[in-house]
Image (cartoon, grey):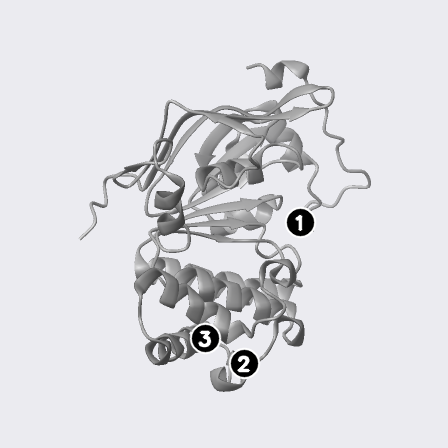
Amino acid sequence: MPDQSQPILSVKNMSVQFPTLSGVVTAVKNVSFTVGREKVGIIGESGSGKSTTGRAIMRLQPATAKMVADEIRFEDIDLMRASEADMRSIRGRRISMILQDPKYSLNPVMTVGEQIAETVILHERVGRREARARTLAMLERVNIRDPERVFDLYPHEVSGGMGQRIMISMMLISSPSLIIADEPTSALDVTVRQQVLSILDDLITERNIGLVFISHDLNLVKSFCDRVIIMYAGRIVEELEAAKLEEATHPYTRGLLQALPSLDHPRDRLEVLRRDPSWAEA
């Protein structure tokens, strides 16, 4: 039985740099946070370092990138010291990542069932018959009708909402302890998005695992997550409970909130976010 009081993930002073023709760019600067068995949202504008943070945890940066940290500890493993072979056994089995658009994440020349089953075969060394049975059960668990038919479909034959359910099936079938979801619903319409989030929420609660939910959507994160981390220019500028997002004090977070349209308080003109260079150095 896992210790509920201990964080699944602990990140201390992590930075990620990329070399460019005009010099070194620091995409993530000295970020520190923990994730327990909860839903933690990371929000900010494009370029704020959200996705880079998620990929760095899984050690999925390009070979030219430089990552440093005092510590990145996942359960009993120091990810900074783990070998690439160790990381291959962790990715997909103990930490899973759900990406933005399944059309670009799934293999176009394999059926969706084969791709989900491959995860079980690779990480748990089971036979194809058992892998197929577990895949069908998982497809049914994410509310896909007629799993036998869907098993044999190719990615281009499924809708966006079904594709994202398939991705959730693939990422959860090996029962990971942590999921990193990078804009998993941004390509979906509102109704399908709520269905996918409901399924994801049920599975996270049912399996008692942690979630890092990366998003631009403040309202979505506020209603879906337990805690929120706000990033600006590669830094964490504020962290608070999701339910108290309206009580944020940092001017960047306040600016993001004021730029949101509201049906309850309609305005002729939304606020324009004003940035202060000192935020990137704080």
What amino acid is labelled 3 in the image?
Answer: Leu
Q: Nearer the viewer, mark 3 or mark 1?
A: 3
Q: Is residue 210 in view?
A: no
Asked whether the residues under the numbered discs 3 and 1 touch, taking CB atoms below 8 Å apart as contact, a structural biologist would say: no
Residue hosting label 2: 150
Q: Looking at the picture, how far across and down is residue 148, in whole percent? A: 48, 85
Residue hosting label 1: 264
Residue hosting label 3: 139
What amino acid is labelled 2 in the image?
Answer: Val
Spatial distance from mark 1 to mark 2, Cα to Cα? 42 Å
Say which label, 3 or 1, has the lower sequence index. Answer: 3
Asked whether the residues under the numbered discs 2 and 3 touch, taking CB atoms below 8 Å apart as contact, a structural biologist would say: yes
Asked whether the residues under the numbered discs 1 and 2 touch, taking CB atoms below 8 Å apart as contact, a structural biologist would say: no
Residue at 61% from the left image edge and 46% from the top image edge: 217
Q: Is residue 18 in view?
A: yes
The foreground one among 152 and 194 is 152
Spatial distance from mark 2 to mark 3, Cα to Cα? 8 Å
Q: Is residue 51 above or below residue 281?
A: below
Q: Nearer the viewer, mark 1 or mark 2?
A: 2
Q: Looking at the picture, how far across and down is residue 3, in whole percent? A: 20, 45
Residue at 41% from the left image edge and 55% from the top image edge: 92
